[in-house]
Image (cartoon, helix red, strand yellow):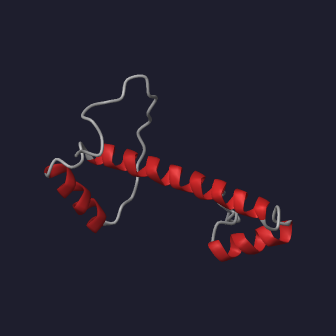
Amino acid sequence: MPLSGRGMVFGMATRKVTVTLDEAQLARIRELVAGGTAASVSGFVQHAVGVALDDVSGWGAMLAEALAKTVGELTAEERVWADEILGTGKRRGRGKRSAA
């Protein structure tokens, strides 16, 4: 069964972006498209992003529920520690270019 229907979803605002993928991943996606499992490379990526966003929000909700039932909210120090361990902390200088 295809991951998404053929064609655009009407009423859905979209924007074209450039995404860099590993060559092996792109080859596998193109095989799925050629085999009819995915409608297009773009459709496959849109589907994958949707699944990833749902996954992130689901894990976040589950973590919040577990914390509420056990120890409560994280302290600022615990959040910093968790961000460092998980590699999700804010990156310094991101988006800014230094004048050399």
Residue drawn at 27 percent across, 36 percent down: 5
Q: Is residue 70 above or below residue 33?
A: below
Q: Quadrant of the C terminus?
A: bottom right
Find residue 71 and report its horizontal and vertical position in percent: 82, 68
Q: Is residue 95 visible?
A: no
Q: Quadrant of residue 43?
A: top left
Instruction: Looking at the picture, tell me which residue is in the foreground, 72 or 24.
Output: 72
Residue drawn at 39 percent across, 45 percent down: 46
Q: On the picture, is 10 further left or further right than 34?
A: right
Q: On the picture, is 34 further left or further right than 57?
A: left
Residue drawn at 85 percent across, 66 percent down: 76
Find residue 95 and report its horizontal and vertical position in percent: 63, 56
Residue drawn at 22 percent across, 62 percent down: 27
Q: Quadrant of residue 25?
A: bottom left
Instruction: Looking at the picture, tell me which residue is in the foreground, 36 or 61.
Output: 61
Q: Residue furthest left?
A: 35
Find residue 79 and report its horizontal and vertical position in percent: 77, 67
Q: Is residue 7 visible?
A: yes
Instruction: Looking at the picture, tell me which residue is in the foreground, 55 or 32.
Output: 55
Find residue 84 and report its horizontal and vertical position in percent: 70, 74
Instruction: Looking at the picture, tell me which residue is in the foreground, 59 or 42.
Output: 59
Q: Is residue 98 above or below residue 46?
A: below
**How many numbered circles does the render carry?**
0
Q: Residue furthest top?
A: 11
